[in-house]
Image (cartoon, rainbow, N blue to C red):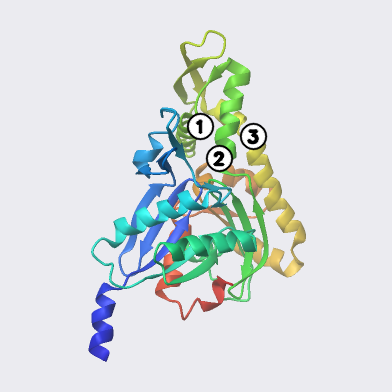
Amino acid sequence: MNFLKKLLGLFSTQFAMDLGTVNTLIYMKGEGIVLNEPSVVAIEKNTGRVIAVGKEAKEYIGRTPPNIEAMRPLKDGVIADFDVAKAMIKYFLNYVRKDRKISRPKMVVGVPSGITQVEKKAVIDACIQVGIKDVYLIEEPMAAAIGSDMPIELPKGNMVVDIGGGTTEVAVISLSATAFSESLRVAGDEMDESIVRYLQKKYQISIGTIAAEKLKILASSSRHSEGEKRVFNIVGKDLVTGIPRNIKITTEEILEAIEEPVSAIVDAVKRMLEKLPPEFVSDLNDSGMVLTGGGALLKDLDKRIESKTDIKVKVVDEPLLSVVLGAGKALEEMGKYKKVFIN
């Protein structure tokens, strides 16, 4: 019997997944992160046939003929198109499982803290229908806190702000449970759309959301360049003539373009602090808060939150990986982290 269990263990696969609006990351037990791909699927409209998934499908956005659609099956951190999301998850799992397909695996999945029962069911059903035996859900801020090595098991307030593509999660965690949380459906995607609108209004030029995302990332990459004024070239469609036009835009202009969603995120952090009892506020005054997710890389966002709250802010070393690493850690040590999973 023991030999049989060991033999089956060789072919079993256990995963943790950060099913994100912008990117999907998968962690395999014992191996670490094995996949990091855009959450994009290109399908043939008439038949529903999947043409491409991930990086390849992302290249299709804005460039497809009428019979093909490149889409993100998740919106605001949750499944918006069930069938397409199911096809995407299946494709990614088949890719990472490769020859390990004998047993039905179990999987930990990160979800927004504000997820509804209907949205939870959609995630679980999608995973089960692609061959997952057992699905464990973990709130993304909890996973991010674990992935950031915060002492969540202590009777002490730990604050995490996870700025993803579709949602910003603000949470205070104590005794392996979420004491206070807010899920704000304003995050990276809203910043991209703000850049598109800014360029249309100021320069009468139109660019796609993928180009806007690249601008945001370029601006983020200069977050440690004190006093440096960086200039980026953009080629877009002139809204008056309809022909291509090249313009130059500075880091400061990009930050001005995303001011509204960034202000909403800062306000959410301040609202959270207003809700907290004095004991938690005292804890945070000592330990500070942690920024994770792609939005954590925005230039001077940590300094801005510090100035508005008088609380130390730390950006983790790998903010884009915090959720999947935390979910993976919970998978590796399920006995230790059994309290963190949600029903």
* Residue pointed to by mark 2: 189
Front-lying residue, 2 or 151: 2
- Side of 276 relative to 173 (left or right): right
At label 2, counting other C-alpha atoms closer than 10 Å, the crowd grade (few under 14, some 14-19, many 20 or more) is many
User: Does residue 93 appear in this view?
Assistant: yes
Q: Secondary structure at mark 3?
A: helix
Front-lying residue, 226 or 335: 335
* Residue pointed to by mark 3: 259
Assess whether mark 3 and mark 2 are in contact (beta carbons under 8 angstroms).
Answer: no
Q: Residue at x 43, y 38 (%)?
A: 46
- Side of 220 relative to 13 (left or right): right
Say if 25 sits above or below 216 in the image: below
User: Does residue 309 appear in this view?
Assistant: no
Q: Earlier in the sequence, mark 2 or mark 1?
A: 2
At label 1, counting other C-alpha atoms closer than 10 Å, the crowd grade (few under 14, some 14-19, many 20 or more) is some
Q: Residue at x 30, y 65 (%)?
A: 31
Question: Residue 281 in the image: x percent, y percent?
Answer: 71, 63
Say if 134 sits above or below 51 in the image: below
Query: Alpha carbon of mark 2 to alpha carbon of mark 3: how far?
Result: 13 Å
Say if 212 sits above or below 110 in the image: above
Instruction: Give the residue type at disc 1.
Output: Thr
Q: Residue at x 35, y 59 (%)?
A: 93
Instruction: Give the residue type at disc 3.
Output: Glu
- Name the quadrant of the C terminus: bottom right
* Residue pointed to by mark 1: 209
Q: Secondary structure at mark 2?
A: helix
Q: Secondary structure at mark 1?
A: helix
Query: Alpha carbon of mark 2 to alpha carbon of mark 1: how far?
Result: 8 Å
Q: Residue at x 56, y 49 (%)?
A: 80
Mark toward the viewer: 2 or 3 = 2
